Image: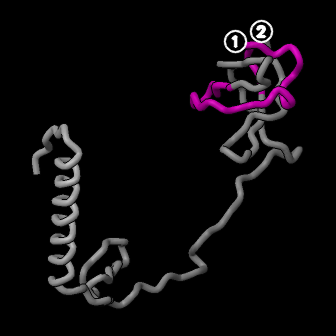
Amino acid sequence: MAKRITSGKREREKLKQTKRQDKQKKKEERMSAGSRSFEDMLAYVDENGVLHASPQDVGPRAEIDLSEIEVSVPRRTETGAEEPLSGRVEYFTSSKGYGFIKDASDGEKYFFHVTNAPAGIAEGDRVAFELERGTRGMNAVRIAIIDK
């Protein structure tokens, strides 16, 4: 239905009334088409996560030998601490108390808070640091300035 510009109150009321009637007709058409059954609304997921309208045939499952699964933790150095990483301070604002360090080996940027940094840290400083998991990802901690 094309919109028209109306100037009078009666014309606006007529337009509203016709819109209501059109909406009611559409609703009645949907209701008369019949409601879908619960089975029509179901979706089936196969072992690969693909949705299907009907259940898929399930074949025999492959048996997995649990003794072949290896779970391990990376080895630490003899002191028990990780090797410190090195990088450069990309961004630091002392007024807000945080910054970012770009790792020299892989180019990843890590967040750090001023409480984990030495007092004289500034942008462009080369630093050594360790990583710890924070609430929003990996954070640089135990930061030491290598050279300015």
Instruction: Name the amino acid, label 2.
Output: Lys
* Position above or below: 56 against 116: below
Amino acid carrying label 1: it is Gly
Q: In the image, which residues are magenta?
A: 100-128
Mark 2, residue position: 148
Total numbered circles:
2
- Where residue 61 sits in the image (x, y, percent)? 40, 87
Instruction: Let me know if residue 101 is in the magenta part.
Output: yes
Q: Around disc 1, counting alpha carbons within 10 Å, would you say few (fewer than 14), some (14 to 19), or many (20 or more)?
A: some
Q: Residues within 10 Å of mark 2 (few under 14, many from 20)?
A: few
Residue lying at the far top in this picture: please name it: 148
Name the residue tied to disc 1.
124
Q: Is residue 48 left or right of residue 91?
A: left
Indicate yes or no whether the magenta region holds residue 78: no
Which of the marked residues, 2 or 1, is nearer the chain's N terminus? Answer: 1
Q: Which residue is drawn at the image coordinates 84% and 32% (left, top)?
A: 142
| Color theme of the render | one colour
Residue at the image position 26 percent from the left and 78 percent from the top: 52
- Cα separation, mark 2 vs mark 1, equals 7 Å
Give residue 37's position: percent from left, percent from top. 27, 89
Q: Is the Cβ of the residue at disc 2 closer than 8 Å to that at disc 1?
A: yes
Horizontal and vertical percent position of residue 109: 62, 30
